[in-house]
Image (tube, rainbow, N blue to C red):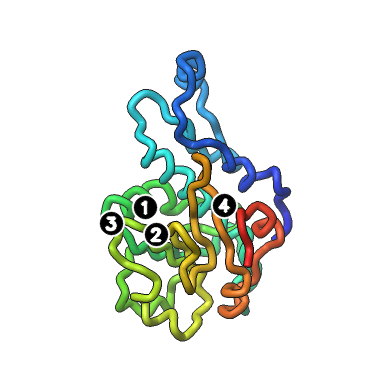
Amino acid sequence: MERFGIHGHLAALLVRPWRHPSRATRRFLRKTSLSVLSGIAFSIFPIQNTIAQSAEQQVKAAFLYHFCSYVQWPGAAPFHADTTVVVGVAGSRKTARFLEKNLQSKRTGRCNLQVQPVKPNDDLKDIHILYVTHDGGFSLKDFRALERNPPVLTITEEPYMPNGSIINFVVLNDYVRFQVSNSRAGETGLKLSSQLLSVAVHVN
């Protein structure tokens, strides 16, 4: 759980993901990919026609990629490279396809990620992480299965921390950051690493 330092994988993402770099920087980036997350290359600076929204999605996907390394699910043995963590995505088809492309079957060293589209009437019994995006037309309150407080890591992207969310992505001064509800995590039986809490912009 505490294996990575604050200046490791998560801290590496706390950079400006979509401010246009100088011409010299763009030339450099065309030759050298910025690599984050232990060799998984997410190019987080926009180059030429890369739009801000895509860059934001890449950073969020990179965070998702490593969150399972900082969360302990109740009753679960420590995750290893062959452990499958199912990420339920409640979002647009475009977002779901993007996450499938960037996360499907990716290994973090502790788990193997599997992306699965979900809808509010699903029981979520096989879901470890529920990611409700702003472009899907859903909110956490639409998922009745969450009323039973299942051990699901709920992730949202709202201007303010919504009820029931454990991690909420926000954009502050061009940085993708996240808020954490440690109290909500405790209600569901999830244990969050102190290192995850230390890089959150707000914890309650």
Residue 120 drawn above or below residue 18: below
Q: Which residue is drawn at 61% across and 61% down?
A: 80
Residue 196 drawn above or below residue 143: above
Type of residue at label 2?
Val
| Mark 3 or mark 2, earlier in chain | 3
In the picture, measured across the screen, residue 77 lies left or right of residue 156, that is: right
Between the residue at mark 4 and the residue at mark 1, the CA separation in whole angstroms equals: 15 Å
Q: Which mark is residue 18?
A: none
Between the residue at mark 4 and the residue at mark 2, the CA separation in whole angstroms equals: 14 Å
Q: Position of residue 151 (x, y in %)?
A: 53, 76
Question: Label 4 crowding class (10 Å Cα cut-off): few <14, some 14-19, many 20+?
Answer: some
Q: Residue at x 31, y 56 (%)?
A: 135
Kindly state the secondary structure of the residue where label 4 is placed.
loop
* CB within 8 Å, label 1 to label 2: yes
Q: According to the image, label 2 marks what residue?
A: 115
Mark nearest the camera among 3 and 1 is: 3
| Mark 3 or mark 1, earlier in chain | 3
* CB within 8 Å, label 3 to label 1: no
Q: According to the image, label 4 marks what residue?
A: 108
Q: Position of residue 127 (x, y in %)?
A: 44, 71
Q: According to the image, label 1 marks what residue?
A: 100
